[in-house]
Amino acid sequence: MKRDALPFYRVMAYVTGVWLILLVIGMILRYGFGDPTMSSIVAPVHGWLYVIYLIATLLLTRQRGFTAGFAILTALAGTIPFASFVAERQVTRKAQRSARVQ
C-alpha cells in the first residue's frame, strides 16, 4: 500500500513558508540594522527545508500525475514569501480532485 504524498507536501509547504518569512525578517535585520545573527541561523535551515519541500513537491507530482509546469510553479512558490501558503491550498484542491477521479 502506497502512502499518500499530500500530507507530507502540505506540512512542508507550511514549514517552508514560515521559515521563509523568518528569513526575510532576518535579512531585514542584517541589511537594515547590521545584525546578521538571525539570518545566519535561519538561512541554512530554510535552505535544507526548501530541499525537502522540493522532494515533497516531486513526490506529489509523480503520484498524482501533475504536469511538469505545474510542478515547477509549485516549487517556485517556496521562494516567494506567503506564496507557499497560497500554492498549498491550490495544490491540495487539485490533488483531492485527482484522487476522486482515479
Image: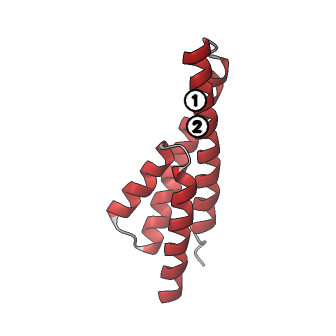
Mark 2 Cα within 10 Å, few/some/many (few <14, many 20+)? Answer: many
The residue positioned farthest toward the front in the image shown: 32
Residue 15 bears which disc, if any? none
Residue 53 versus residue 24 in the image, above or below: below
Quarter holding the N terminus is bottom right
Residue 67 versus residue 20 in the image, above or below: below
> Can residue 102 be seen in this snapshot?
no
Left or right side of 10 for 76: left
Mark 1 Cα within 10 Å, few/some/many (few <14, many 20+)? Answer: some
Secondary structure state at the residue bearing disc 2: helix
The residue positioned farthest toward the top in the image shown: 34
- Residue appearing at x 55%, y 69% in the figure: 92
Do the CB atoms of the residues marked 2 and 1 lie less than 8 Å apart?
yes
Query: Disc 1 marks which residue?
Result: 43
> Can residue 96 be seen in this snapshot?
yes
The amino acid marked with disc number 1 is: Ala
Residue 24 falls in image quadrant? top right
- Residue appearing at x 48%, y 80% in the figure: 98
Percent position (x, y) of residue 51? 51, 44
Query: Disc 2 marks which residue?
Result: 46
* Depth order, front residue of 4/50: 50
Percent position (x, y) of residue 20? 58, 39
Cα gap from disc 2 to disc 1, whole angstroms? 5 Å
Secondary structure state at the residue bearing disc 1: helix
- Residue appearing at x 65%, y 25% in the figure: 41
Left or right side of 80 for 68: left
Percent position (x, y) of residue 11? 65, 57
Residue 58 versus residue 51 in the image, above or below: below
Q: Looking at the image, what colour scheme do you see?
A: secondary structure
